[in-house]
Each structure stands twice: as structure tokens, then as C-alpha cells.
Image (cartoon, helix red, strand yellow):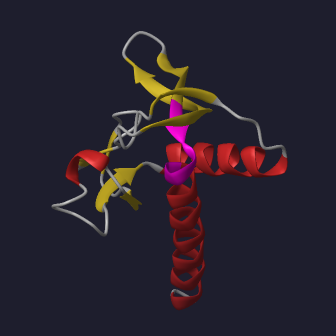
Amino acid sequence: MADCDLCGVAIPTVVPVRVFKPKYAHSYPHGMWQGLCEGCLNAGKKAHDKQAESPSCGTAGKCEFCGNIAQLYDVTISRPSFSKGAEEDTVQLCKKCLGSINESHEAWEKQKAEDEHAHH
């Protein structure tokens, strides 16, 4: 079991996303791998596409994924809740993390398509 690094849901398999954390830039110059559930991956992809369509300046702050101080963009995710099952939450991610999520989303969709064809 693994936990999603954004919403915290425990699932058997998470989608790997390469994240460049400034705190670990010298130790991991090529980035670190973090895992996202498919729901958070899709939410990040949606936020990336929205930001690409109409680029806004975002809000300044600390990215909740990599910890970098940058311009941030809202990503609406579904966070597990014991009382309600799930509730919507908004996390703020930087443009670099949204780009990494977009790359991982494309690779994940490609892998799912290949696996689907392999079973037939």
C-alpha cells in the first residue's frame, strides 16, 4: 500500500511524478519521485490545462508538493474524510509541479492503453 502525496488516500498503486524539491537539489539534482492517486493526477492535469489556456499570474506562496516558493495555482482535489467519505479541498502547486504532473499523466494514460491492448 502507498499513500498519495497530495490527498493522503492509501491505495495499492500510485502514479510516480518527478518533483524537483529545492531543499534536496544537491542530493537529487534530477528530481525525486512522489506518488499521486489517479484522482489527484487528473485534478493536476486539469489545473495544468486550465493554466495553459488562460495563463494567470497565480498567487505567491509555497508549493504544497515541492516546497518551492513560487507563483501557485489552485488544484481542487478530493480528500478522504471519515465523517463524509470525501470532501473537496484546494491545494496550491507551482507551474513546475503542474508540468511534471502533466508529463506523468500522459505517460500513465499511454501505459494504461498499452496494458489494455496486451490483455486482448
Q: Residue at x 50, y 37 (%)?
A: 70
The x and y percentages for residue 82 are 36, 15
Q: Position of residue 15 (x, y in %)?
A: 41, 59
- The residue that appears at 76% across and 36% down in the rendered structure is 56
Q: Where on the picture, by quarter, is residue 6? A: top left
User: Based on the displayed image, in which of its 4 quarters is residue 54 positioned?
Assistant: top right
Relative depth, front residue between 106 and 10: 106
- Nearest the camera: 21 or 3? 21
Quadrant in which the C terminus is drawn: bottom right
Residue extending farthest right? 54
Q: Is residue 79 left or right of residue 58?
A: left
In reply to whether residue 96 is colored magenta, the answer given is yes
Say left or right for 45 vs 80: right
Image vertical order of residue 113 relative to residue 60, above or below: below
Q: Magenta stretch: give its range.
A: 92-97
Q: Position of residue 20 (x, y in %)?
A: 36, 56
Nearest to the observer: residue 48 or residue 116: 48
Q: Is residue 90 magenta?
A: no
The image shows residue 91, relative to residue 93, as above or below, that is above
Q: Seen in the image, is 99 located left or right of residue 7?
A: right
> Count of labels shown?
0
> What residue is shown at x 21% (from left), y 52% (from top)?
24
Residue farthest to the top?
83
Residue occupying the point 41% across, 9% down: 83
Q: Nearer the viewer, residue 66 or 9?
A: 66
Q: Where residue 118 appears, x then y in whole percent? A: 52, 90
Q: Is residue 28 above or below residue 42?
A: below
